[in-house]
Image (cartoon, grey):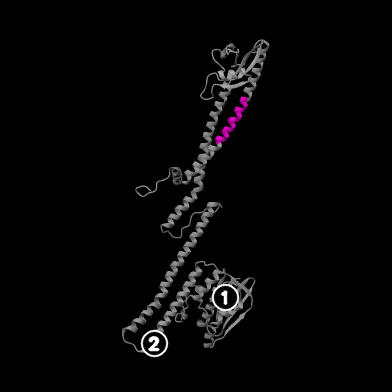
Amino acid sequence: MTPGGSTPVAPGGGLRARMRRMPIVLRLVLTVALAMSVVLCGAAALVYWRVQYALDRQLDEDLTAYQHSLAMAVRTGGQLPAAPTGSTYQILDAGGRVLQAGEAARGRQLLTAAEFEDVTAGRTVRRDQGALLPISPDPLRLEATRVRRRGTTVVAVAAVARGHRDEALRELLGQLGLASGLTLLAASYVGYRTARAALGPVERYRHGAATLADGAQGLRLPVPADRDDELTRLGHTLNRMLDHLEASTERERRFIADASHELRTPLTLLRAELDLALHRPRTSEELTATLRAVDTEVHRLIDLSNALLDLEQLGSGEQIRRTSVDVADLVHTATDRHRKAAARDGRALLLAVVPAAVRVDPRWVEPAIANLVDNALRHGHGEVRVQAEATEGRLRLSVTDQGPGFPPTFLSKAFDRFARAEASRTSPGSGLGLALVAAVAASHDGTAHAANTGHGAKVTLDIPC
């Protein structure tokens, strides 16, 4: 730790840290440039090696032929062969003195002392004299061998000019360097344009997300409809996420609005009953009546809160856990709790259920059936009939009564939250029963339908099973 409390950055991490801080486009361009540099250097090295190999092989063949002719002439004492253009020779005695030399080899030593000793020992020496770079004057490739002449040993050194070979290689290096540089620039430019084109949608997505973060509502990321690549799929995924977030936000807003609106009335009534009871001394009968009124409102609050929480749980996309249950058992369990209320009012609760195994979530389907029966008992008249059958992979369940039915203007909004027909506004209930039924149907990928039969109301639940 430094005295100021900060941790020093390791020297080896400086370059990596700077790379991480670079824009992605620049990092991609640098990566492409580095990769292309490696590829171009490898390709240039291969081309250079192949050309150099071809030139060296031709030069070696010329040198070998010239050396063979020179050694033969020295051995037989004949006339020395004419040297190829730019080539030369030297004939050295056993002491290293130059006996004969071509014009280009006069006044210069072609062999070093160590090389001369190697040749006199019987070894052949071949080497280059002069460098490719920097440019050397009169570069040569020479070959020296030991030759017997008239009972004595001499050293014959043949040398051919290397200038054309070196000039060709230097020209090749220049062309390879120019071509590689231009190719690297072109590849970097193409990489830059490609990276900008590829990351353009990401920048548009970022701008759209920034707009949403600033509080804009209902906006979606601009995703091209005529493409199907990784970025467009990312855009569609983000838009679906925004849809879910907006739906979640809307559910929260609606839940808060519904709760604050519907809970205000029973809480106000509770407060009024308590204030009235505390305003002056009350008799035991008056206190009992007040407590009963308070108890009614408390139960109403509990039912309302439970219904709101159930709707919110279903609307939040909770995973439905389907299990195999018998539809007759499901209907009997849901309706048994209402038989006493029906008998007390002198009404019949009739069941017409075809036994079958269905795959539904009984945690939600059972209370949905119970809500339909409860609505029929509270708002309808006469007998209540529950019919259920499972055919063609669908469970169709309906509850009918013999009451006045739904008002025609109410049918289109029967499943809305807190929607209540005018005739039922004075009866108990929160207006959430049918909304819960519709939510249960939707969570099972099904539908709920309300209609009048001419002699009563009918609500049908149709869900795949």
Residue 15, located in which quarter of the rendered image?
Answer: top left
Q: Is residue 211 above or below residue 84?
A: below
Residue 262 x, y percent position in the rendering: 42, 74
**Magenta region, residue range:** 40-56
245 or 330, nearer to the observer: 330
The reply to whether residue 192 is in sight is no
Q: Is residue 268 left or right of residue 424?
A: left
Query: Would you say residue 110 sits in the magenta stretch?
Result: no
Amino acid carrying label 1: it is Thr
The reply to whether residue 244 is in sight is yes
94 or 316, nearer to the observer: 94
Residue on which the image places disc 1: 460
On the rendered image, what quadrant is the C terminus found in? bottom right
Amino acid carrying label 2: it is Thr
Residue on which the image places disc 2: 288
Q: Is residue 179 above or below residue 458?
A: above
Residue 458 x, y percent position in the rendering: 56, 78
- Mark nearer the N terminus (1 vs 2): 2
Query: Would you say residue 48 sits in the magenta stretch?
Result: yes
Q: Secondary structure at mark 1?
A: strand
Residue 79 x, y percent position in the rendering: 66, 10
10 or 164, nearer to the observer: 10
Q: Viewer-nearest of labels 1 and 2?
A: 2
Residue 315 x, y percent position in the rendering: 50, 68
Q: Residue furthest right?
A: 76
Q: Is residue 157 left or right of residue 294?
A: right
CA separation, marks 1 and 2? Answer: 42 Å
Residue 394, located in which quarter of the rendered image?
Answer: bottom right
Assess whether mark 2 and mark 1 are in contact (beta carbons under 8 angstroms).
no
Residue 85, located in which quarter of the rendered image?
Answer: top right
